[in-house]
Image (spheres, rainbow, N blue to C red):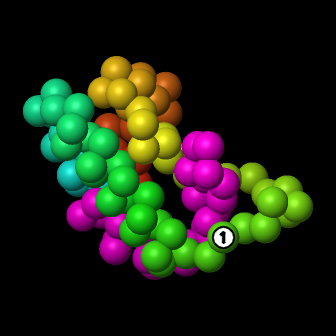
Amino acid sequence: MIIRILGEGQWTVEPEQLDDLQSSDAKVEQALQDQDQDALTEALEGLVAHIKELGSSVPDDVLADSDLIIPDTTATLEEVAKFLDDMGSDEGLIPA
């Protein structure tokens, strides 16, 4: 599975590792519910770090479609909420 982190590139993560990302994704969802920008930034930074820890970087010269897209760590509450709405997701950034 290929995950694109906007502004940073793509990482390959095994599908069974998505469960490992759920706790990080839950922090993003909680920050959105609480309307807490600082918590959102921290949660996005944690999620991105977790993806990079679990996955391997896709070389820039490889063209591959992304299975999931994650906003960059500077995204605002409004941007992430719109991003999720545009995706039609009520499960967060990482599907359960």
Task: Tell me what residue is drawn at x 55 percent, y 75 percent.
Answer: 55
Instruction: Work out whether residue 29 or residue 16 is closer to the camera in this orientation and state it.
Output: 29
- Quarter that holds the N terminus: bottom right
Q: Secondary structure at mark 1?
A: strand
Task: Bin the neighbour count of mark 1 within 10 Å (Cα to Cα): few under 14, some 14-19, many 20 and up.
Answer: some
Instruction: Work out whether residue 10 or residue 14 is closer to the camera in this orientation and state it.
Output: 10
Q: Residue 36 vs residue 72: left or right?
A: left
Task: Tell me what residue is drawn at x 56 percent, y 50 percent.
Answer: 5
- Quarter that holds the C terminus: bottom left
Q: Residue 49 vs residue 7: left or right?
A: left
Does 87 lie within the magenta span? no
According to the image, label 1 marks what residue?
57
Residue stretch in magenta: 1-24
Could you tell me if residue 67 is visible in this image?
no
Question: Is 72 located above or below residue 84 in the figure?
Answer: below
Image x and y of residue 7, in percent: 61, 43
Figure quadrant of residue 34: top left
Task: Tell me what residue is drawn at x 21 percent, y 38 percent.
Answer: 38
Callout 1 amino acid: Ser
Task: Tell me what residue is drawn at x 49 percent, y 26 percent.
Answer: 86
Image x and y of residue 91, in percent: 32, 46
Figure quadrant of residue 74: top left
Image x and y of residue 64, in percent: 79, 57
